[in-house]
Amino acid sequence: MAVEIPKALYSGKIRQTRLGTGPKSVTIGGETSYPFHLFEGEMPNPPKIAMEVWDTPPVDWAEAALEPFKGVTDDPVAWAKKCISDYGAEIVCLQLVSTDPNGLNRGADEAAAVVKKVADAIDVPLIVWGTANHDKDTEVLRKVAEVCQGKNLIIAPVEEGDHKKIGASAIGYRHTVAASTPIDINLCKQLNILLGNLGVPDDLLVMDPTVSGIGYGIEYCYSVMERIRMAGLTQQDEKLQFPIICNISKETWKTKEAKIAEAEDPKMGDARRRGILLEAMSAMCLLVAGANVLVMRHPEAIKLVREMIAELTAK
Amino acid sequence: MPLTGIEIFKLLPKTNCKECGDPTCLAFAMKLAAGKAELTLCKYISEEAKSKLQEAAAPPILPVTIGAGNRVLKVGGETVMFRHEKRFENPPGLAILITDTMPDAEVTARLDKFNNLKYIRVGLTLRPDMVALKSESGDPAKFEALAGKVKQGTDGPIMLISSNPDVLAAGLKACADRNPLLYPVTKENADRMIELAKTSKCPVAVKGASLDELVELTNKLTAAGIKNIVLDSGARTLRRAFEDQVFIRRSALQKKFRPLGFPTIVFPGEMTTDPMKVAVIAATFVAKYGGIIVLSDFYGESLFPLLVERLNIYTDPQRPLATTEGIYEINNPTDGSPVLLTSNFSLTYFIVSGEMENSRVPSWLVVKDTEGLSVMTAWAAGKFVADAIAPFVRKCGIADKVKHHRLTIPGYAAAEAGGLEEELPNWKIEVGPREGSLIPAYLKAWKP
């Protein structure tokens, strides 16, 4: 008796987007089924991992996360290059932590100059992530878009409150926009529509549904992402068919569970491996929910997740 | 597949005898369909119709219970492919492997881990669920001794692993009263295993080389009256195991295909020898349909994240997790430390308390019961407003813990500051940040 495998009925596909320019550009999206459901669809571009670089030396990172980047954390260019040469990064994500008005509050010109230096020094796609402060991001990300004209950066986060100005700059200087909404499928769709109306081309738009790690509400973004994929793939919702980007590393490594020493709580086990696993396991959940790009930090977590992607897509 | 009221009506006697308490058979059928009446109320229903109705009422993925007494593991009973469609019901059981060739000290160490690795989170105790005992020597006496030792060493559910029914029977002898899961039933040993399952009434896990073979085996078992079945599709590569999980659940839920309508078991520990990879593979099956997940060993650094992931994924989307109302001490506060107020939505609590800990500033966190709603939602719903907060602040006892009587409320509840000053005349109300990430800076700037 042969078992008949019930197949899902798909009526749509995820859009394909090219990040960056030149020979090292990366194409994401294009899948025609739920994540890794290769028995009934295609995933022409398996999910990619972007390695995180900060534009200012991190002060509160767990030792385990800092160790692989010893000696380069005070130089974003060297840091980005190390990610590519030592850890095989296919995409770099520069987090503009220094621009936070509640922190160092570095100015737009200075921040944009750093972005330009990094962008000029690497040939892989560059994601530039602001601080989600509308006024500051508007200032900084517009300047970034201008000085990096033609590089097809991925500008994030572009939110409803600042989408017009940042979106217009991205269109003008030809960058990709990461539309960011707070864990809500309707707001996600609405912002995609607004950006479309503004003139952002469909192939220069990716979605950031706002993610969190294990223990900090991963179930919310997990389900929102599954609903987004369901709407785009099976309910012909064209405004939800964009690739998904997840900025997960910060969310997992900032938690106390990723930092607490084994000596302090022996049942929590080895702190280094725990941090790596919290990041890798959170990433895994987001992958099966529909992530196309994961922003990650620890080289070992990245290696683990790359192996999982390879095994899930093995012939 | 649940029948509709009309479909049930067709199977009833249609005499409108009213003895069930309903005026007509149709009304009774509607109640049955809604699960508001019991079939036994109808005395005139034919045996044939009865069995049809019972069959139809059975859940598409049968629940299976392993273990006995205080600690049992219930798996299966799932009704949806995606948790947002309703909820996932029974969290996957996490098992640790112990073999009969391990030195005694190792067996004891693993039992200790099984018994002691427990974590408290949002008032719940998170712990692993099962000990999987594997015969590697093939010696029945050795296996029996191991099962006996483990039975003494824990009250948790047990799984017995050997492809030789004689060895399994020996292990079973030592722990039959604990209702262990017997594994594997294969094409080769099926007849003897059916015998063993029937006499012991213990649940069994079936292993097929393919889904087709799996179906043949479960058909054979159900024909013999065995229904406590767990499925192992035999796949030991991540891709195939993942796809099989999807196939099995879809067949059961969408096709109502009974031969695959059982919970599954997966073996990440047999897919790789790297404990880190085992953990990440296990994480995949927590989200995607694993019923039982057998790990090679337990390590705090991977077990804790897995247990929390499981808690998250199996949280009912309609009912947010909430933490207990009360006063929480953070970084050993004194009577001069700041007092912060927040809601009891578990995420809010974790983020706020985590940021407070990160700040290293000794402080008090006062959590008000908002029925699991976040600050903004609770405020909008009238559960986090001055009228509700003030009585709580008065009776929670924080006034006895501090000398200063200054209360910091969340930025999102800033509108309540005035009302609270009126309701709590001897307190000074201060407005804190809107975002958790700004709490450390706020606390560091707070001056007594």
Image (cartoon, rainbow, N blue to C red):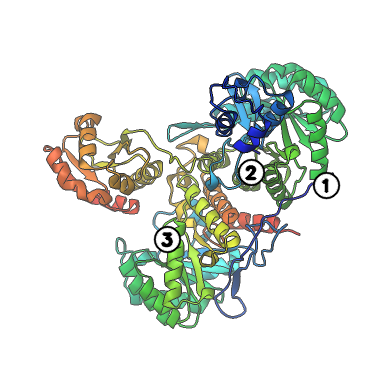
Type of the residue with mark 2: Tyr
Label 2 environment density (alpha carbons within 10 Å; few <14, some 14–19, many ≥20): many
Rendered view: B13 above or below A162: above
Nearer mark to the viewer, of 1 and 2: 1
Q: Percent from the top left, x then y, of residue B44?
A: 67, 21
Rendered view: B199 above or below B415: above
Nearer mark to the viewer, of 2 and 3: 3
Which quadrant of the structure image shows residue B194? top right
- Is there one chain holding both mark 1 and mark 3? yes
Label 3 environment density (alpha carbons within 10 Å; few <14, some 14–19, many ≥20): some
Type of the residue with mark 1: Ala
Rendered view: B69 above or below A89: above
Q: Is residue A164 left or right of residue A76?
A: left
> Which of the chains bears the disc numbered 2?
B
Q: Which mark is residue A2?
A: 1
Type of the residue with mark 3: Leu
Q: Secondary structure at mark 1?
A: loop
Q: Percent from the top left, x then y, of residue B448?
A: 17, 44
State the CA–CA distance, disc 1 to disc 3. Answer: 44 Å
Q: Is residue A171 left or right of residue B135?
A: left
Residue with the mark numbered 3: A187
> Which of the chains bears the disc numbered 1?
A
- Circles 1 and 2, Cβ within 8 Å, touching? The answer is no
Which quadrant of the structure image shows residue B221? top right
Kindly identify the residue that appears in the image at 76 percent across and 38 percent down.
B259
